[in-house]
Each structure stands twice: as C-alpha cells, then as structure tokens.
Amino acid sequence: MRILLVDDDPSLGATVQSWLQLDGYAVDWVLRGDSAATALQTHRYDCVLLDRGLPGTSGDELLRHLRNGKDLVPVLIITARDTLADRIEGLDLGADDYLIKPFDLEEMSARIRAAVRRHASQANNVLKHGEIELDLASKRVTLAGEPVQLTVRELAVLHALMLRRQHIVKRAQIEEALYGWGDEVESNAIEVHIHHLRKKLGSGLIVTVRGLGYRLKDEHA
C-alpha cells in the first residue's frame, strides 16, 4: 500500500516514514499542506496521515477540501491537539481516526490497517484467493494451510493483486504500491517479484496480460 504522510516535524516524520517502510508500505512524506494537495491530485493513496497545523494549507483545510470533493481516502489525523473538543472537531471534518502525539507506532499501524479495511469494506484482516490466504495484520501468507515465506516486496505485489483480484493490475499500479518518491525502480524488478511469487505459490497463479499488466488466475479455472 502507498501512504501519504503530511507532517512538518522533521524528527517525527522521519521516524514514522522509516517505521512504515519497515512495515512494508511505500511512503511519500511532505511537510506542507499545499504540497500534500498536489500529491493527492497526482497520485493514488491508500491512506493519509495528516497533521492539523501545517504551513501552506492547514490539515483541516486539506481534509475539508477532500471530503467536499467526495474523496473518501482514509485519513488519520496525527496531532498534538488533545482536547475532547479538538478530537470531535477533527472527526467531524471527516477524519477516519484521530491519534494524539506522541503515539505508539504499533498502534498507528493497527489503526491504518483498520481504516483501510473499513474503506475497502473488508469483513476481516484476511484476503483469500483459492488456497492462498493473506493475513494483513500478521503479514502471514499460507498456501493450503501451510505458511509461505515472502519478502516485503513480494508481499506487497501479492497484496496489490489480491485487492484487485477480479481485474488486470497495471505495472504502474504495482510500482505505486511498492515505491515511494525517490526510490529507485529497477527496470525488471516487477518481473523478478512475479517470478518468485510463481515459484513459491504456483506457476499458474499470476497471469501476464501482455501489454496491460497482471492478474490472478480465475479461482475456478
């Protein structure tokens, strides 16, 4: 998944970005509200972590603009504003959750998963396709009940395909799920990850649709 982090605190921003990258997310970090607005216009994000007090455009203004424009991307407010009135105001603006600084990083990750899960209308943390199960909370993959060890990148590719298992997933969509701004993308990286997934989960699992992208094979095929 790709996350937009909007916070003007250099220390906290670097810590949160590093943590989420270790947790398997691609993270774009901006320090200004107007920069965040530009990023949201040009990229698709699975979740936004948003501070309220920002230079340029405030977090409140940005959130209000998103919701007025019917953009339902999950937004978690991360802020030092900790009164009950502050929390109510943030949630009424359209935030999906509200985290008060300082916060626990593991709790933040859990809240991200919950917000994304609600947004996708998924009943639980587990994605299923045939005999493959992907537990989003534990990052655990099983094939016919047996655990399969995947790298962080392989897991991200599988997640992108399973989220859109009825559709062709374009190469650019997979790259957006894997890489943040400034990350170097090797020309054959996607093909390598697909190759490894086929070796670990079955050669026929991922179908290449030439010139378009990839899709998971029909479960009933």
Image (cartoon, rainbow, N blue to C red):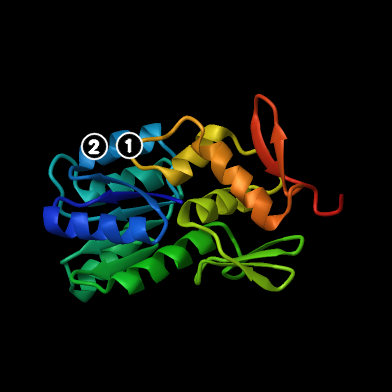
- Amino acid at circle 1: Ala
* Front residue (pair 211, 104): 211
Identify the residue at the far top of this view. Answer: 211
* Front residue (pair 57, 42): 42
Q: Secondary structure at mark 2?
A: helix
Q: For residue 24, which quarter of the picture?
A: bottom left
Q: CB under 8 Å between callouts 2 and 1?
A: yes
Judge whether residue 9 can be spotted in this image.
no
Q: For residue 209, which quarter of the picture?
A: top right
Q: Which residue matches tag 2? A: 35
Q: Position of residue 202 (x, y in %)?
A: 73, 53
Q: Residue at x 13, y 57 (%)?
A: 11
- Amino acid at circle 2: Ser
Q: CA distance from mark 2 to mark 1?
A: 6 Å
Asked if residue 140 lies left or right of residue 47, the reply is right
Q: Position of residue 36 (x, y in %)?
A: 27, 41
Q: Residue at x 25, y 46 (%)?
A: 61
Q: Is residue 121 above or below residue 61?
A: below
Q: Residue at x 21, y 67 (%)?
A: 86
Q: Secondary structure at mark 1?
A: helix
Q: Which residue matches tag 1? A: 39
Asked if residue 68 lies left or right of residue 127, the reply is left
Q: Residues within 10 Å of mark 2 (few under 14, many from 20)?
A: some
Q: Position of residue 23 (x, y in %)?
A: 39, 61
